[in-house]
């Protein structure tokens, strides 16, 4: 079994891990209502995805 010849220093390990950071969620505007939504998901406010109604919202049922 392979065993490291020398101990890896803290600095070397931390240099390697500099790119392991979390990024902010990307958002786009809903073409129907203009609300900020995550891409490739149904808009929670209007219920549309790619110009098709996927979910009936409560607001539309009352009208």
Image: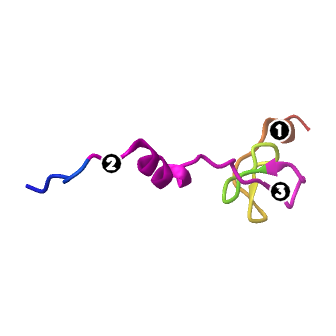
- Based on the picture, tell me whether residue 32 belongs to the magenta stretch: yes
The percent coordinates of residue 27 (x first, y second) are 76, 53
The image position of residue 49, as x and y in percent, is: 73, 59
Decide whether residue 51 is among the magenta residues: no
Quadrant of the frame with the N terminus: bottom left
Give the spatial CA distance, label 1 vs label 2: 63 Å
Magenta-drawn segment: 7-36
Callout 3 environment at 10 Å: few (<14), some (14 to 19), or many (20+)? many
Instruction: Say which element carries label 2.
Output: loop
Residue at x 15%, y 52% (from the top left corner)? 3
Residues under numbered marks 2 and 3 in contact, where contact means CB atoms less than 8 Å apart: no
Q: What number is the disc on residue 25?
A: none
27 relative to 44, above or below:
below
Q: Which residue is mark 2?
A: 8
Which residue is painted at 74% across and 65% down in the image? 50
Residue underneath mark 3: 30
**CA–CA distance in space, label 1 to label 3:** 21 Å
Name the quarter where the C terminus is drawn.
top right
Of tags 2 and 3, the one toward the viewer is 2
In front of the other: label 1 or label 3?
A: 3
Q: Quick check: 15 left or right of 56? A: left
Q: Nearer the viewer, mark 1 or mark 2?
A: 2
Horizontal side of 28 relative to 40 (left or right) equals right
Q: SS for tag 1?
A: helix
Residue closest to the far left: 1
Classify 53 as above or below 60: below
Work out whether residue 52 or residue 40 is closer to the camera in this orientation and state it. Answer: 40
Q: Nearer the viewer, residue 22 or 36?
A: 22
């Amino acid at each position: 079994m392979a065993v490291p010849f020398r101990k890896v220093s803290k600095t070397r390990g931390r240099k390697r891990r500099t790119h392991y950071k979390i990024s902010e969620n990307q958002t786009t505007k809903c073409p129907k209502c203009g609300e900020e939504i995550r891409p490739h998901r149904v808009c929670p406010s209007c219920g549309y995805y790619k110009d098709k109604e996927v979910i009936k919202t409560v607001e539309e049922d009352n009208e």
